[in-house]
Amino acid sequence: MPKLADQFTLNLLTVAQSAKEVHSLRMNFDYKKQLVTFITDSQSATRFPVTGNKSRSVYRSVHDYKSGLAFTSPFEPFSISRKSCNITIIDGSTMDSRTSTTSNTSAIHIRHANGLFGLNTDGWVYIGQKEFKDTDCDVWACLQPNVSGKSILVEAYWMQGKWTSNGEPVLYGMIQYESNLTNKKENETYTTVVSDYTSVPMPQRVFEVDSCLRTSHPIVLTFSLRVPDASNATTRSVAFTGALREALSLEMAISPLRLPDFTIRKPSDSQQQLQVYVTILEWVNVTARALPASVAQKDSREAVDALLKKVAANDLDLKINFNGQNQTVTILKNSTTGGADVTKPTVVPGPTSTTPSHSDAGSTVAPAGSPAAAAAAAAPAAVQDSGYTGGSMAGLAIAMILIGGVAGLVAGFLLWKRNTGIAYQVYD
């Protein structure tokens, strides 16, 4: 059976016919970075199909396997800031996690992509070709005759390579038939449609957890950086700062989620030097049960002081992968300062400086027993922030429409009054 890439983005829409439920899941998965983001939207109704916002909940969750923490908050796409954030240890029962046990200890790890959705289960058999959503697909099936009193048959539909841009088969959908062995009234069928699948590298902002960590004043770190080509770095700043973020977080022994904002500037008289400004967010203390997979994090001041000590007398080399090549960039000695009193320069749009923007994408739960399984059920609010809500933004939009309409009517009336005075002739 074909395999999923270990770095991908996709959408899942799962319909449970008997339960009258619809679950939408957007997932960003990066095995190398050990990061997963979900946005889940579930709703149910007393009749089917579902209409309106009945029993609806939307959450965004980021799983950081380097620290073992899950950051979950209600998702409001029209809100300037999310209103709450719940920080917990990653649950070993989520669809993207697996548990390993050695002697008397256990640890939580991220699954490989092919371990998601049950695709690594033994017993998959190729059964031929079928249409799924009017598209020819190769179909694989797996029968599990008795799972907790249920017989489960899953069909995985892979879109043939002739329909894809790179000629590789793509997971297009799954149908799961559940037969209750003791009560046929509890039988269920889940139909999952996969869309917008891509294995193109994702920007860091799809994993950002700024609203969860900006609970205290951040520290700004600045340093001079020697690079092979400063112009190329500023032109492709998003890719460059992404590579630098990974290397710097590794050097400082902190999560890359704590380095959300980079500003880079190229001095006019240098082609091999940049001035870099980076924001470092404070980490959080989780009092829940600790797991061996959780990594202790330095506080911001401690992490900055350790870096300053390294570059006090010697240059510091960092290994990055940029433009598909392994490169070495160097933090110049005695060029580094960091603290709450350091300010970043005002960014002027142009090729010589940039601050990557941040937006939301990706997060949590699919229905229990469905092919999408269940990502962590997230919920209670913990940190309160102020911000515009979706309702206030909608009200503002309506007000602007009304003002525009009134202005149009006034302008039309004035033009009509003017035109009524046009001279005319009378002919005998």
Image (spheres, helix red, strand yellow):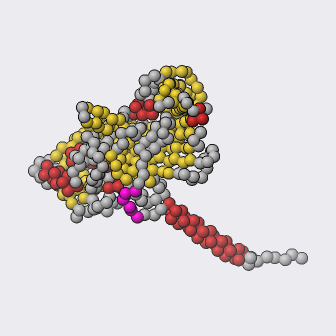
Asked if one can make out residue 95 in the rendered structure from this viewpoint, the answer is yes
* Residue positioned most to the left: 313
Residue 55: % across, % down: 54, 51
Judge from the rendering whether residue 111 lies leftward or rightward of residue 343; answer left or right.
right
What residue occupies the far right of the structure in this picture?
428
Which residues fall within the magenta stretch? 381-386
- Residue at 57%, 32% in the rendered image: 183
**Residue located at (50% from left, 48% from top):** 41
Q: Is residue 380 magenta?
A: no
* Residue 276 drawn at (x, y percent): 25, 53
Residue at 58% across, 26% down: 130
Q: Residue at x 81, y 76 (%)?
A: 425
Q: Nearer the viewer, residue 269 or 204?
A: 204
* Residue 333 position within the rendered picture, expressed as x and y whole percent measured from the top left: 14, 51
- Residue 422 x/y as whole percent: 74, 76
Residue 410 versus residue 97: which sits nearer the camera? 97
Is 176 situated left or right of 223 in this image? right
Q: Is residue 196 visible?
A: no
Location of residue 371 with respect to 242 vertically, above or below: above
